[in-house]
Each structure stands twice: as C-alpha cells, then as structure tokens.
Amino acid sequence: MKLALMISALCIASLGVAGCSSSVTQPDEYSGFLKDYSRLKEAKSPSGVEVMRWIDPKLDVKKYRSVYIEPTQFYPQPQPTAKIPQSTLSGLTRYYDQALQRELSKSLPLANGPGPGVIVVRAAITAVSSKTEGLKPYEIIPVALVAAAVSTASGIRDQETTLATEAVFLDGSSDAVLAQVVRKGTGKPLENDTQVMQANDVKGVIDGWASDLHQSYLKLKAN
C-alpha cells in the first residue's frame, strides 16, 4: 500500500514535466477533423514521440514535386477566453503555418495550390481533454490548460499547457488520402491559473511537429 501511494505521489508531482497518463491521443479525444480514424495505428515519430499514424503502404513520395500547405485551422472553432485570448489563438495557427512552411520547404518547393505532383497538407489544432484523476481543466477548448499539481505540500499548482493536432496529407490531383497523423504535446507550464497563455508557450511543441513531418518525408523518400 505504501509503495502504491509513493508511486501515485511521484506521478502527480511529475505531471508538470512529463505526465503519467498516456502521451498518445485516445479515441475519445478525436475531434472529427479526419474522415477516417479506423486505420490509425500507434507508432513513433522520427523524434521518438508516440503518435497515432497511418501511411498508405503504396505511397511513392518521389512522384511529388511540391507541397501545398493549407492555412492551419482550429477544429472545432473555439471562442476566445480571458485565459486564451484571440491574439493567442491567431498566433498559434499563424506559427503552425510558418513552422510547416519552414520545415517542408527544406525538401520540396512550396506550391500555390493543389494540382498534379503536389502533396496537400491540411492540419488542424484540435480539442484535448484532461485524463488527470482528481484534477480538472478550467478551459475545455482546442488549446486546453490542464491543472497539474506540482507541489501538493505547499499548495502551489502550475498550469500545464497541452496542444493537440490532427493532420491529413492528400494527393493534390485526386484528393486521395496519402497519410494522416494525430498527436499531442506539452508546452511550458504557466505559473498559476490567472496567467494568460501565449503562443510562445507552445512554440516548441509546434516546432517538434513540423520537424517530425519533414523527417518522416525524408525517411519515406529514402526507402
């Protein structure tokens, strides 16, 4: 019993760093942005992060000569709040666009629209929910601030910033699905429940997503 209590306490104490719940997006957290979730399988991204992913086994990325990145969207569309204002929401989608363009343009020219030989990237920032027993999020919107106990002895609680995405990759000519991925990540903790979240708090998460997409492309091209 004492061992179980110690493990539980350690888990709660470490939530602000890594989290004891699964880092993989669960089916009840899917937003509905993707048309089909049934083919998703658990996999590891190039950086070693667990994700839910599907890649067409017949995909030949070498036949694609450019990439078109659609403007990132929220799904579902959130309403700004005092904790997460419109400036933060706009900053998140804008930065996601910039990160994708920066990383994917390292290997493929950016196209102005869909077409033959073009990979279309359609990404969204999607809803997440708290799986922390006894601790509830005070914002249930696509960017959720999840309460995480960091120091139960002192009564201080940091606010963990969690971001989730779903993305689909399409053939620019036929609109056929080439691949899709669902994942989430944890950004910088906020000091308390009154601190306003900024886009900067999760830029590292978005950078990781974009980098992994580019590395996945390189890996597929090398096969």
Image (cartoon, rainbow, N blue to C red):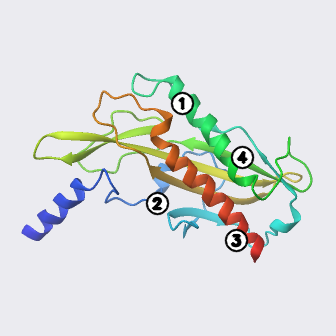
Query: Measured along the vertical axis of the image, is residue 85 above or below residue 45?
Result: above
| Residue type at numbered disc 4 | Gln
- Residue nearer the viewer, 85 or 134: 85
Task: Work out which residue is located at the far left of the displayed protein and give it.
Answer: 2
| Residue 207 numbered tag | none
* Residue under label 2: 24
Which of the two discs, 1 and 3, labels the residue nearer the N terminus? 1
Pair 4/2: label in front:
4
Q: CA distance from mark 1 to mark 2?
A: 23 Å
| Residue 219 numbered tag | 3
Query: Measured along the vertical axis of the image, is residue 37 above or below residue 153?
Result: below
Is residue 177 at all visible to an observer of this figure? yes
Residue 142: x and y, percent? 49, 38
* Residue under label 4: 101
- Residue nearer the viewer, 14 or 175: 14
Residue 39: x and y, percent? 63, 65
Q: CA distance from mark 4 to mark 2?
A: 25 Å
Disc 3 crowd, CA 10 A, few/some/many (<14, 14-19, 20+): few
Pair 2/3: label in front:
3
Is residue 78 at all visible to an observer of this figure? no
